[in-house]
Image (spheres, rainbow, N blue to C red):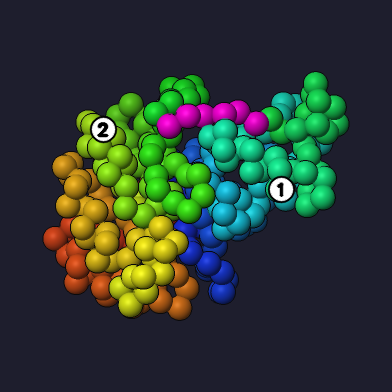
Amino acid sequence: MKLKILGCSGGIGGKHLRTTSMLLDRDILIDAGTGVMDLSIAEMAMVDHVFITHTHLDHIASLPLMIDPVADRRSKPLVVYGTEAVLTILRNHIFNWAIWPDFSEIPTPEAPFMRFQSIERGQTIDLNGRKITALPAEHTVPAVGYQLDSGAASLVFSGDTGVCVAFWRVVNRIPNLRHLIIECAFSNREKQLALLSKHLCPEMLATELLKLERSCEILITHLKPGQIELTMEEIETCLGEFRPKMLQNSQLIEF
């Protein structure tokens, strides 16, 4: 399996800052932030599955926009996966005809351009041997992380989360864990904001990583524009023993 990072920033503000979206092989998206907008129409048309962690705009901004330009190139619906709570928010607040057309009914309900599929925490979707499992997360809206399992190795993406004991309980049971992509949205000086918004800062992340019982590569995502250097300096101070690296836009991870 090959995971290409299309976007991993906590916001926009420069030509290299794209919000969360990851392309697995050529046909699966993990979240659909602004990074998707760098794909060509042909590349977008190849995407058959989109797994959403949660419905904050930086993770779904491209989802409604990517369907229309490729609809005439596709022979089957784009399948959007999320918990029932996530799908309800998408139906009520995005694909509601007021904000954007409901592509689950266009051109007909029987043969739509898009189809919603519910996934529960702990449930695994098997796509030609590529197993994707929804993991616990703790955020201000209903949220999950995802385990991507090639059989040979697994990559875990936390999504947006604050302190979450259940997340580590599950991660520690993954025998072939090789990569952990985990968020750190704020610097330590904004710890109270991190707590309020259920994100992590370096001090909190250091405490969370003490719960990790497996050896793996740790990659930091969702850094806030304008505080990237500061936050990474704090991460190196707080988490030096874990040797974390900053996730990079366009990075390719094979596992």
Residue 56: name its quadrant: bottom right
Span shown in magenta: 116-121
What crowding class fits label 2: few (fewer than 14 Cα within 10 Å), some (14-19), or many (20 or more)? some
Residue occupying the far left of the picture: 241
- What amino acid type should be assigned to the residue bearing mark 2? Ile
Residue drawn at x 66%, y 43% is 90
What crowding class fits label 1: few (fewer than 14 Cα within 10 Å), some (14-19), or many (20 or more)? some
- Please identify, in this view, whether the residue under mark 1 or under mark 2 is nearer the observer: 1
Using residue 185 as the reference point, say whether residue 154 is left or right of it: left
Residue occupying the far right of the picture: 107
Residues at discs 1 and 2 in contact (Cβ within 8 Å): no
Q: Is residue 85 visible?
A: yes
What SS does tag 2 mark?
Answer: loop
What SS does tag 1 mark?
Answer: loop
- What amino acid type should be assigned to the residue bearing mark 1? Ile
**What residue is shown with label 1?**
94
Q: Which part of the image, by quadrant, shows the C terminus?
A: top left
| Badge number at residue 78 | none
**What residue is shown with label 2?**
174
